[in-house]
Amino acid sequence: MKRRDFFKASAVGVGAAWLGTISRASVVAAEPGTFHAADMVAIGNTGIKTSRLACGTGTVGYNHHSNQSGLGVEGLADLLVRGYDHGLRFFDTADSYGTHPHVAAALKRVPREKVTVLTKSWARNPQQMRADIERFRKELDTDYLDILLMHCLTEPDWTARFRPTMDVISEAQEKGLIRAHGVSCHSIGALRTAAREPWVQVMLSRVNPIGSHMDADPKTVVDTLWEGRAAGKGIVGMKILGQGDLRKRQDEALKYAVSLNLLHAFTIGAENAAQQQDLIDRIAKVTI
């Protein structure tokens, strides 16, 4: 399918245990039932539909390396394709993880238009962002990026500081080079700004029941994300397992993520097929 045709076809303009941590004004009761990693969900008002669980590729990801990149190009590609075969249609990558070549290898083995690729750039000026968008497309061997985020924002006034860079991303969207854009934040000030900024279409945020590696305490973060969701933004969770701090409490963490009825999707990085299958199985056992 050609990129223009694809865009025309796809474009579209808490569990009781944790209710006490969320303001009553923001709570929307989750429908009782069961959930699956492969559930197809809409990411806010972006027009993108993808799996509830994203295949994360950035566990301990920095300096162009992650635990997943250490699997090698074909090793990680095999894991991503296995996820695809089990209904996981959301690949989460970033320049800083060093996993673009690995995702590219996986995309050669699956229908491109059926996979959502989210990536992230550290660029903070227009020239760098323009170069990153072109480089990312080449590294991923794809005509377009589904979701491009400005990575790891910390400044509360980032919209004033980086507006020219944001404009470059908007221009790329108008040209069909990306489908949706947004931010990942690493401070509560930046996250609050993201929730209120009309330019932001997708928010990637750290969320777990113990506040591990989060921008603030769970209540504060959740209330802020609800503000963004109420404005139609896609809300994607990360650090669901607290970067390993909840490895022995995975069922609790997964139930928390689902029971909030806040996250459209969430990303978790498996490092082998057994871990990936365990996540899929655990999510299927979550009931609310």
Image (cartoon, grey):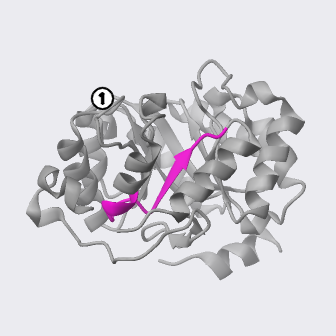
What type is the residue that disc 1 sits on?
A: Glu
Judge whether 274 appears above or below 110 on screen. above
> Which residue: 39% across, 56% down?
255
Q: Is residue 267 magenta?
A: yes
Would residue 139 appear left or right of 230 to someone viewing this image? Answer: right
Residues 107 and 190: in front is 107
> Which residue: 33% across, 65% down?
261
Residues 176 and 71: in front is 71
Q: How many marks?
A: 1
Residue 24 lies, in percent from the top left, at: 9, 63
Q: Residue furthest bottom?
A: 9
Judge whether 40 appears above or below 215 on screen. below
Quarter residue 2 falls in: bottom right
Classify mark 1: residues with Cα within 10 Å, few (<14), some (14-19) or many (20+).
some
Q: Which residue is mark 1?
A: 155
Residue 53 lies, in percent from the top left, at: 57, 57
Q: Residue furthest top?
A: 63
> Which residue: 48% across, 39% down?
150
Q: Is residue 29 magenta?
A: no
Residues 232 and 27: in front is 27
- Whether residue 142 can be seen here: no
Would residue 171 appear left or right of 190 to someone viewing this image? Answer: right
- Whether residue 2 can be seen here: yes
> Which residue: 43% across, 71% down?
45
Residue 103 lies, in percent from the top left, at: 77, 44
Residue 167 lies, in percent from the top left, at: 47, 48
The span shown in magenta is: 258-270
Would residue 192 appear left or right of 280 to someone viewing this image? Answer: left
Judge whether 278 appears above or below 95 on screen. below
